Each structure stands twice: as structure tokens, then as C-alpha cells.
Amino acid sequence: MNAHSWMGRGMLSVAVALLVAACGGPLEYMAKGTPRAPDADAKIVAEVNSSTVLTTVSIEAEHLAPPDRLMPGATAYVVWARKDSSSQWQRIGSLAYNNDKRTGSLPTATVPLTSFELIVSAEQQNAPTSPSPHVVIQQKVAD
């Protein structure tokens, strides 16, 4: 392969990479735990669909203490989203918690927004009407 064809292929690779980046793709966040759960880590993947104003979210969390260690009587980790600090929180799902591995996952949830705040909180039930102050993960998702 001569230098000219190598340069041409290199430029093509850069152009393809820039095109893929410009077209979007899922947003990925590595969120650290809050001071309530400093050992927690979460991978959050958000696939934004601007045309339908919907975002599909998945979460994989590690190093999560049992919920009742953070809040007496807590049995679940619940995931919440809101547009901004002046908006109401919307419950979008619960983490499936594995007590032995100290992990939690939410394979998929849909948020009717393309830019929002996301939190995970310890709760006494899977379907509370608002989040407790026992937040273990927080992340701003923005397209």
C-alpha cells in the first residue's frame, strides 16, 4: 500500500467517525454515587429520539448497599426523571436489585423528555409518589 492510498483511507476513517458522531448515538454516562452511597457506580445509557421527544434509558449500578441500610424500611431503588428543578419528579422504574452481588439494573425505561435530571433513590416501596431524600445516583441527561 502506498502512502497516498494509506492517507486516503485514514481520511476516510476520520470522516466516517465524524459522521457517526454527528448523527448521534446513545449517550453514555458513568455516574458516581452521592455522599449517601459513595461506593456506588452506575452506567447510564440514554438513547434520545428528538423527533418523538422520547429518551430510552438503561441503568447498570454496582456497589449498592441494601436499600434498608440507607433508609429504615426501604426495600427498593426507584428511578426518577424531571425536566428541571421547577418540575415534578416522574417515576420511570425501579432497579432490579441483587442483594448478593450488590448490583441493580433497569434494562429499559422511557422518559418523555430529551434533556432531564435523573436520580435513583432508596424507597420503602416500588411505586412511591415522590422520591425520598435518600438519593444514591444523580445524573443530568442532555442531548
Image (tube, rainbow, N blue to C red):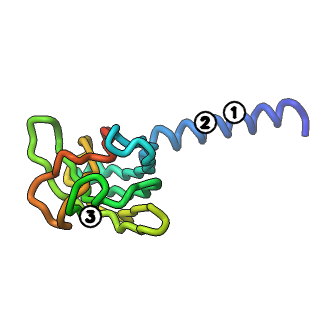
Mark 3, other Cα within 10 Å: few <14 / some 14–19 / many ≥20: many
Circle 3 — which element? strand
Name the residue carrying label 2: 15
- Please state which of residues 72 and 79 is positioned toward the viewer in this rendering: 72
Q: Which mark is residue 76?
A: 3
Task: Say which label, 1 or 3, has the lower sequence index.
Answer: 1
Q: Which residue is drawn at the image coordinates 32% and 43% (left, top)?
A: 36
Name the residue carrying label 1: 11
Q: Is residue 143 visible?
A: no
Q: Which mark is residue 111?
A: none
Q: Amino acid at mark 3?
A: Ala
Q: Which residue is drawn at the image coordinates 24% and 41% (left, top)?
A: 117
Residue 46 on image: x %, y %: 37, 51
Q: Which residue is drawn at the image coordinates 55% and 36% (left, top)?
A: 18
Quadrant into which the N terminus falls: top right
Q: Is residue 20 left or right of residue 117?
A: right
Mark 1, other Cα within 10 Å: few <14 / some 14–19 / many ≥20: few
Q: CA distance from mark 1 to mark 2?
A: 6 Å
Contact between marks 1 and 2 (CB within 8 A): the answer is yes
